[in-house]
Image (cartoon, helix red, strand yellow):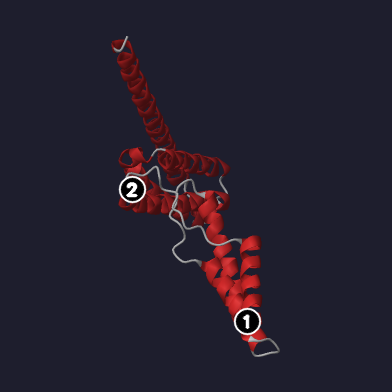
Amino acid sequence: MLILSAFVLLRKGVLVEMAFADSKYAKAPKYPLKLAGALSLSSAIFLSAYFGEYNLISSAMLASAILGGWYLYYGFDPRVDKIKAYSSDASAQRILALIAESQKRVENIYNYAQKTPSKDVAHLMHEVADGFSNIIEHIEIDPDDYNLARKYLVSYLVELESMSEHFSKLDIKERTQEMKEEFVELLNTTIEKLNKQYKKLVDDDILDLDIKMSVMKKRFKNEE
């Protein structure tokens, strides 16, 4: 039972670690699943050896060898947060939670687009998802812009995800041309808004950098 538990924990731990590795910023896994799996396996080996033909010391050494081999081959769980870009741990928790939730919603829109028979609508749904993805990636890189982009992810993304789901589930025969045109118009408006917002976020960063460089040049000039 302990051996089975060890590899179940290992599998879950590896999946959590992969998600952590794929994120630019993330909290370290809450539970050390890989470590728990290693301890579970080494405990099983220790008990099997001790109640078999080995004495206490030999059993402990064998269990330690298993633990060391596990570490060398699989490693243990990440314990250091990747949140240095955030101003505080509290803000990191809030921003990372929104990013994770938003990424799932964007993925849902991509999936709904694939289920939509109308190719032109599906293409626009993909563009909408791409637009939201750009904003999410920007927040990951520059968390200071969180408040500027928050409403797009908290409000607009949630609504677009819901509408995309409903549209993808409707039977093609029930889709009136008028409703389709309205949805297409809404998607086009959303794409335009997302592109403008993303450009604004980038332009603000460029302006901020330009100001910092100007200040630095003035300081150098004053020191001459």
- The x and y percentages for residue 205 are 38, 29
Q: In which quarter of the image is residue 52?
A: bottom right
Name the secondary structure under disc 2. helix
Q: In this view, does 41 lie to the left or right of 205?
A: right
Q: Quadrant of residue 143?
A: top left
Question: In the rendered view, would you say 47 is above or below 121?
Answer: below
Question: In the rendered view, would you say 16 is above or below 127?
Answer: below
Q: Which residue lies furthest to the front in this view?
A: 57
Name the residue type under label 2.
Ser
Q: Which of labels 2 and 1 is toward the front?
A: 1
Q: How crowded is mark 1: few (under 14 residues within 10 Å), some or many (20 or more)?
A: few
Question: In the rendered view, would you say 114 is above or below 191?
Answer: below
Q: Which residue lies furthest to the top in this view?
A: 224
- The x and y percentages for residue 163 are 42, 51
Q: How crowded is mark 2: few (under 14 residues within 10 Å), some or many (20 or more)?
A: few
Residues 70 and 142: in front is 70
Q: Can residue 4 be seen in this view?
A: no
Name the secondary structure under disc 1. helix
Question: In the rendered view, would you say 35 is above or below 98?
Answer: below
- Could you tell me which residue is drawn at 37 percent across and 33 percent down? 197
C-alpha distance separating marks 2 and 1: 62 Å
Residue that numbered label 1 is attached to: 57
- The x and y percentages for residue 218 are 31, 14
Residue that numbered label 2 is attached to: 155
Q: Is residue 214 visible?
A: yes
- The x and y percentages for residue 188 are 44, 36
Residues 139 and 80: in front is 80
Q: Quadrant of the C terminus?
A: top left
- Could you tell me which residue is drawn at 40 percent across and 41 percent down? 139
Q: Quadrant of residue 223?
A: top left
Q: In this view, does 127 lie to the left or right of 53?
A: left
